[in-house]
Image (spheres, helix red, strand yellow):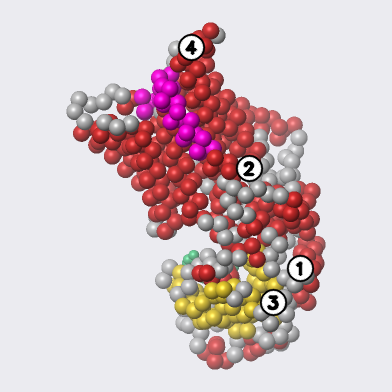
């Protein structure tokens, strides 16, 4: 099985603080892996390190078999940042923001063609924003803006989709619709890396959970183990817990709560 | 209206159209970036360039282009390193530019009255050679602002997403900064360095009162830009005032008008989704 993401013993320090410590993670082609953990446990930082937005202090990241510094096939990656707004200083329509997701397929000064328009329209349909395509993103609700960012990533038709808390701020119906869309993608062979607060509707879609705990990862082998009665035992083996750095953030005493599942 | 046939008015009108198109095009990206004052900072740096040109006895426009482009690049690199925030970097541009300009001017024996042309603009004295320079610079600016619009939009809208798209973000940022510097030096001939930023920013602010999209905002800002620069030149001659200040006053009037329209539109029907 081909490895899509290979995170090997990665450590990250930001502002002199150790955020990630010796984290390893693998994602095989077609796999759907969720990254769980409390607020501040380093989930977003790990995802940002994977896409090259955060420098590594130690370890390495490979994407589609290529070490990150030499990786060039960005059109294969769709990234949905954790975000509150899709707006900026000048108005932009939903369609204009989503169209930015096609740029990984283009050289500078390149023209958009039929394939681009089709991908943009399909992405808008998927997240249910087609009727609002000409609306200004600044006027949308938080949940709608989140869907704009998801559509932007989908528009690139990526082989690997990385979503950082994509469900936050989405109402129930939209969560279900998004789950359906992601299921179709997985069926079509797309690999998924999802940062989640709780698995929710995505439960059945997820092959495996990785739990971050104060900047360290413990990989649950199968998705059902992560829903065990005593998550602390299954997701964070004793030797892991003992070796937690004293500076682990936000999570000093209580074990992870991965029970918030439906 | 027979004065419109006068050669110097016609040259001024051509310059007005070029600058009216170029300045708001670049200004749209600066506003999107929330770097609306960047134009001012670059204007101050360009002052150093102008003074250097006088001192060296070369074309002040040429030295202004070079110094402003260098300043823009340095500020962009400083910002990218995260060593200083955008507004601190801008503050350095402002004060360094003014101080450098004043220092260099004071080095020149007898002072310099020509400096006023660059401080307040003097579109009615544009020569044919000036026009070639303005046309070349404005053409380059428009090529970048329009040809790279998708890339620049992405970088200004969400820099991190742009990086994950594989865009050369640092290079695009520098291209934008240098383009802004070129625009400032072109526009200084028209409205002067003190008001240059107004021509970059005010048409954009006016346009976005009425628009929902980025392309629409840029197009409307360029239309407003041409309207006010041409309008300023046409009106300044008969009422005998400086066109530079008149252009900016007109732009602010258009902003007042579009703001009013936006308010009225909001009153007449509920905000569109
Ligand atoms: N740019 C940064 N500089 C310094 N510290 C940061 C930065 N980004 C995140 N952190 C810190 O890293 C820790 C992990 O953050 P994050 O990865 O966002 O966690 P999560 O996504 O799991 O909530 C937090 O304590 C946060 O304050
Ligand atoms: Mg996060």
Magenta residue span: B117-142
Residue B179 shown left or right of residue A98 in the figure: left
Distance between the alpha carbons at the discs numbered 2 and 4: 38 Å
From this view, report whether residue A26 is shown above or below residue A127. Answer: below
List the residue tagged with mark 1. Answer: A185
Instruction: Specify the subunit that label 1 lies on.
Output: A
Distance between the alpha carbons at the discs numbered 2 and 1: 30 Å
Q: Is mark 3 on a helix, strand or loop?
A: loop
Residue B81 shown left or right of residue A140 in the figure: left
List the residue tagged with mark 4. Answer: B6
Q: Where is residue B93 in the image (x, y as percent from the top left)?
A: 36, 44
Evaluate whether label 1 is on the same chain as label 3: yes
List the residue tagged with mark 3. Answer: A29
List the residue tagged with mark 2. Answer: B214
Distance between the alpha carbons at the discs numbered 2 and 3: 37 Å
Cβ of disc 3 within 8 Å of ligand 1?
no
Evaluate whether label 2 is on the same chain as label 1: no
Q: Which marked residue is nearer to the observer: mark 3 or mark 4?
A: 4
Q: Do the residues labelled 2 and 3 touch (CB within 8 Å)?
A: no
Q: Where is residue B76 in the image (x, y as percent from the top left)?
A: 43, 51
């Amino acid at each position: 099985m081909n490895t899509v993401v290979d995170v090997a013993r990665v450590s990250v320090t930001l502002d002199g603080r150790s955020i990630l410590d010796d984290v390893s993670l693998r994602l095989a082609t077609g796999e759907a892996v969720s990254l769980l953990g409390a607020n501040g446990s380093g989930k977003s930082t790990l995802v940002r390190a994977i896409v090259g937005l955060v420098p590594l202090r130690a370890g390495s990241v490979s994407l589609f078999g290529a070490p990150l510094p030499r990786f060039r096939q960005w059109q294969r990656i769709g990234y949905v940042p954790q975000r509150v707004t899709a707006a900026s200083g000048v108005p932009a329509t939903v369609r204009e923001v989503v169209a930015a997701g096609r740029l990984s397929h283009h050289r500078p000064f390149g023209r958009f063609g039929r394939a681009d328009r089709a991908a943009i329209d399909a992405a808008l349909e998927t997240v249910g924003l087609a009727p609002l395509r000409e609306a200004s993103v600044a006027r949308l609700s938080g949940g709608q803006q989140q869907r704009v960012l998801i559509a932007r990533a989908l528009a690139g038709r990526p082989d690997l989709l990385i979503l950082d808390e994509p469900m936050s701020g989405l109402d129930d119906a939209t969560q279900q619709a998004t789950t359906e869309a992601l299921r179709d993608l997985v069926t079509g062979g797309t690999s998924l890396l999802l940062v989640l607060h709780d698995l929710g509707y995505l439960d059945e879609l997820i092959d495996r959970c990785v739990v971050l705990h104060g900047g360290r990862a413990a990989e649950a082998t199968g998705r059902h183990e992560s829903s065990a009665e005593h998550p602390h035992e299954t997701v964070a083996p004793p030797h892991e817990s003992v070796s937690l750095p004293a500076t682990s953030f936000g999570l000093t005493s209580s074990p992870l709560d991965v029970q918030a599942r439906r | 209206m027979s004065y419109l046939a006068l050669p110097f008015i016609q040259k001024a009108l051509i310059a007005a159209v070029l600058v009216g198109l170029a300045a708001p095009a670049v200004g749209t990206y600066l506003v999107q970036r929330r770097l609306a004052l960047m134009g001012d900072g670059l204007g101050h740096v360009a002052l150093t360039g102008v003074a250097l040109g006088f001192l060296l006895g070369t074309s002040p426009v040429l030295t202004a282009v070079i110094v402003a482009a260098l300043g823009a690049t340095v500020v962009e690199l400083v910002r990218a390193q995260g060593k200083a925030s955008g507004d601190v970097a801008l503050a350095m541009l402002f004060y360094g530019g003014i101080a450098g300009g004043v220092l260099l001017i004071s080095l020149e024996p007898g002072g310099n009255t020509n400096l006023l042309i660059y401080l307040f603009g003097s579109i009615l004295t544009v020569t044919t050679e000036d026009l070639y320079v303005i046309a070349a610079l404005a053409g380059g600016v428009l090529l970048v602002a329009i040809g790279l619009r998708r890339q620049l939009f992405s970088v200004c809208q969400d820099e991190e997403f742009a990086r994950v798209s594989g865009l050369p973000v640092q290079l695009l940022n520098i291209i934008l900064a240098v383009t802004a510097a070129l625009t400032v030096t072109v526009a200084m001939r028209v409205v002067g360095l003190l008001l240059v930023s107004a021509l970059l920013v005010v048409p954009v602010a006016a346009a976005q009162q009425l628009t929902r999209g980025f392309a629409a905002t840029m197009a409307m800002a360029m239309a407003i830009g041409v309207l006010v620069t041409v309008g300023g030149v046409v009106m300044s001659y008969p009422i005998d005032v400086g066109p530079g200040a008149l252009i900016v006053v007109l732009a602010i009037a258009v902003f007042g008008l579009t703001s009013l329209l936006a308010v009225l539109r909001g009153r007449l029907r509920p905000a569109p989704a």
